[in-house]
């Protein structure tokens, strides 16, 4: 958390208010995130106009003529607007302040596992981004691609689709939900699943992620979107966080296992 829908929701929430704005200063109160925010960030960005925003996986790119600000929300980060001069709280680590504007963009991160980086090169060639797999909502993510990559793989399908080199942005919440919707057990080996069932999984991943984006993502604890509001997809969750509760389809008790140190919830009756 936040996963792809939350990152996309954040981008959509801040994009219209950022494009065309000129940065007046950057207030860095806590530079020690996952990687240190370099002091040069302020001098590099100040005076630059923001031209556009983009997303790659869970990374947001805020682009100027000089370069790109790369933001990762980590496990608990949020980017949202506050009225100018709003006093920061303890976990409010960075403010981006704009010329002739009455709002600031604020970065909050209680766990400090996010990142704010600057590059003057093509951000798609950045070390954190260039090895990422296709976007799950793009045409590049399709059954032919997934079937080819799954061939011979002896890893559980849930672990497989959460690998960002296979496909980006399918985090724990949405992997649970997509596998349930596709009727596939999360512990089945990726290389043993038929192409027809993988086609269904691709479809379900797209449907689940699109629905989550429409609902503004999922707020379990800390996440708020660019408008400062929580995400509402939590009410749509069929299995995630529902261990030992009845399946919404067949009423069987949902089971919980641990995979790669993460909670996995599934229905042994509906998923095979």
Image (tube, helix red, strand yellow):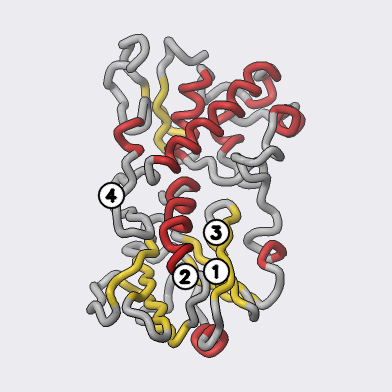
Of tags 2 and 1, the one toward the viewer is 2
Can residue 129 be seen by looking at this rendering?
A: yes
The answer to whether marks 2 and 1 mark residues whose Cβ atoms lie closer than 8 Å is yes
Circle 2 is placed at which residue position?
Answer: 18
Which of the two discs, 1 and 4, labels the residue nearer the N terminus? 1
Query: Residue 83 location, x and y as percent?
Result: 27, 74
Q: Please count the marks in the image.
A: 4
Above or below: residue 24 compared with residue 60: below
In terms of sequence position, does the residue under pointer 3 or pointer 2 come before the other? 2
Disc 3 versus disc 2: nearer the observer: 2
First of labels 2, 4 by sequence position:
2
Up-down: is 18 above or below 243?
Answer: below
Residue at mark 1? 62
Q: Which mark is residue 221?
A: 4
In the visual, does 235 lie left or right of 190?
Answer: left
First in sequence, mark 2 or 1: give its number: 2
Mark 4, secondary structure of its residue:
loop
Which element is circle 2 on? Answer: helix
Looking at the image, is mark 2 or mark 4 nearer the viewer?
Answer: 2
Mark 4: few/some/many CA within 10 Å (<14, 14-19, 20+): few
The disc placed on residue 264 is none
Q: Nearer the viewer, mark 3 or mark 1?
A: 1
Q: Which of 210/141 is in front?
A: 210
Residue to which mark 3 is pinned:
59
57 is higher (above) or lower (below) than 255:
below
């Amino acid at each position: 958390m936040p996963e792809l829908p939350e990152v996309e929701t954040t981008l959509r929430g801040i994009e219209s208010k950022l494009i065309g704005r000129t940065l007046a200063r950057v207030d860095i109160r806590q530079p020690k995130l996952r990687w240190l925010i370099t002091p040069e960030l302020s001098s590099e960005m100040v005076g630059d106009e923001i031209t556009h925003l983009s997303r790659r996986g869970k990374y947001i790119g805020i682009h100027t003529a000089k370069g790109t600000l790369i933001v990762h929300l980590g496990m608990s980060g949020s980017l949202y607007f506050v009225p100018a001069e709003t006093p920061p709280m303890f976990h409010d680590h960075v403010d981006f302040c704009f010329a002739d504007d009455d709002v600031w963009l604020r970065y909050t991160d209680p766990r400090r596992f996010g990142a704010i980086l600057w590059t003057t090169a093509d951000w798609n060639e950045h070390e954190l981004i260039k090895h990422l797999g296709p976007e799950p909502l793009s045409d590049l993510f399709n059954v032919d691609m997934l079937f080819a990559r799954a061939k011979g793989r002896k890893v559980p399908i849930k672990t497989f689709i959460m690998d960002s080199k296979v496909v980006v942005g399918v985090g724990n919440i949405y992997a649970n939900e997509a596998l349930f919707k596709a009727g596939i057990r999360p512990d089945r080996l990726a290389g043993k699943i038929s192409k027809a069932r993988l086609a269904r999984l691709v479809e379900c991943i797209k449907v689940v992620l699109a629905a989550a984006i429409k609902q503004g993502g999922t707020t379990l604890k800390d996440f708020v979107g660019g408008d400062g509001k929580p995400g509402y997809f939590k009410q749509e969750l069929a299995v995630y966080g529902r261990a030992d509760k009845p399946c919404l389809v067949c009423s069987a008790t949902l089971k919980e296992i641990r995979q790669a140190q993460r909670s996995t919830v599934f229905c042994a009756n509906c998923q095979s």
